[in-house]
Amino acid sequence: MANKTDVAAGQVHGTDPQFLIEKITREKIYDSVFWKEKCFGLNAATLVDRALELEAIGGTYGGLRMPSKFLCLLLKMLQIQPERDIVLEFILNDDYPYVRLLGAVYLRLTGKSVEIYQYLEPLLNDYRRVRMRTPEGKLAPVYIDEVIDNLLTRNEYLDTALPFLQKRLQLEAQGKLGPRVSALEEMIEAEKEEAAAAGADAAGETEEGEMGQDAPVLGDAAQIAEQEQRVAEQRRAKDAERRRRLGLQDEKAELEEGEEEHKASAAAAAGSSSAAAPAASSSSSSSRRDREDGEHRSSSRRHRDDSRERERDRDRDRERDRGRDKHSSRSHRRDSRDRSSERSSSRRYRDERDEDRDRDRDRHRSSSHRDRDRDRERDRDRERRRSRERRRSRSGSRDDKHRSSSRRGGEEPSSVAAAAGAEPSGSNAAGSERDNKKRRRSRSRTPDSRD
């Protein structure tokens, strides 16, 4: 019951909110100690206290792929399904970066495409560093804008499959989203406005110098030039910091922009100095202009050399890639040739083995048939001999019985005649005759019954 979704929670993307986490990861979270001890009985109010204790983000880690605390709290949010206002407060919180990231990942899993772009794109300007637990279990530094970019561009992050996100261009074509405004464009516009304001201030000061302040104007012009130089250095430092943090690739555009700003500042400084003191500062302004032109030429030459070196590196990389591709294609052809030869040899060996097996099987079958036929013939001969012997024995027994019966029948009349001669008349002779007839009948019947 403790792992069931709240009855008041609705479906997200047509399914149970907890099913947005894979089943294997979900079962590991249910079996973890942090879930049983710290996440039991949490609600939308007490969940904030657990989120404030987070020290890192991450998915699963270690050899057993144990779930992180961040992933456990994410599943708890899917289980209780807090209100949308609470989730937005998590995202808009500037003090606790892990609370902000927890709300951002939850919105990426449950929100619609328009809401995701609307609330997560501003977080791309958050460059704070946070800790992330790697799959090996170690802690590695990442940045919040990097995490948000992965949520907007990848299909799987933190060992969780992210739902489908509609492309921004499609939403802009449908009129659901306006064009994205980069923070870099706002900074560039602000810098242009500052440069225009500085130019206007410098022009006003030159006009005041022309009205009659000839003596102190030279010192004011030098201060203005130093200030312009400091401003230019600060802008260069800001540009370098911006390139380092945002990772801009278009260095040529920034170089042209820096050159234009440098020319504008140099022109403003030269105009102010020449208008304030045309006679006294002509030599100093010309020397400064020459020095600036020399610096500009040296910087342009240095950038040109860097671009040429980059082109040479690209050419070398292309040649190396071509050579690697040729070598890989040759090795692939060689491997394919070896595989084909091995396949043909194995096929030939398999065919020969099948032929040998079939030949042995046929030989065994023919030998077994021959043995079987031989056994059958032997059995038939044996049965024939037995039947002949049985027939002979029966015929011989019949002949012996017939001979014995015939011998006995020839001897009896003589004995009867002798008896009759001894006793020619009387009742005794008649009785003996009857007895002799009975005996003869019984003897004549006995061989027939035996047969």
Image (cartoon, rainbow, N blue to C red):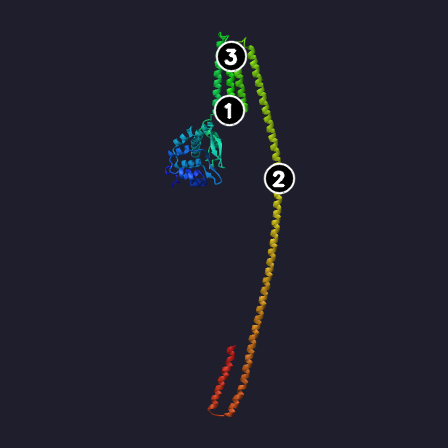
Residue 447, placed above or below residue 117: below
User: How far, Cα to Cα, is label 3 from label 1?
Assistant: 30 Å
**Amino acid bearing label 2:** Arg
Residue 367 left/right relative to 64: right
Question: Circles 2 and 1: CB distance less than 8 Å?
Answer: no
Identify the residue under disc 2.
333
Q: Quadrant of residue 403?
A: bottom right
Counting from the top left corner in percent of width and height, residue 246 is at 50, 27
Residue 15 visible in the displayed image: no
Q: Earlier in the sequence, mark 2 or mark 1?
A: 1
Q: Earlier in the sequence, mark 3 or mark 2?
A: 3
Q: Quadrant of residue 296?
A: top right
Question: Circles 3 and 2: CB distance less than 8 Å?
Answer: no
Residue depicted at 56% across the width and 76% down the height: 395
Residue 360, placed above or below residue 83: below
Q: Nearer the viewer, mark 2 or mark 1?
A: 1
Pick the quarter of the image with the N terminus: top left
Q: Which mark is residue 241?
A: 1
**Amino acid bearing label 1:** Glu
Q: Nearer the viewer, mark 3 or mark 2?
A: 3
The crowding category of the residue bearing disc 1, from other C-alpha atoms within 10 Å (few below 14, some 14 to 19, many at least 20), is: few
Counting from the top left corner in percent of width and height, residue 380 is at 58, 67
The crowding category of the residue bearing disc 3, from other C-alpha atoms within 10 Å (few below 14, some 14 to 19, many at least 20), is: many
Residue 268, placed above or below residue 90: above
Identify the residue under disc 3.
221
Residue 365 left/right relative to 214: right
Task: Say what secondary structure mark 3 lies in.
Answer: helix
The crowding category of the residue bearing disc 2, from other C-alpha atoms within 10 Å (few below 14, some 14 to 19, many at least 20), is: few
| Residue furthest to the top | 212
Counting from the top left corner in percent of width and height, residue 201 is at 48, 14
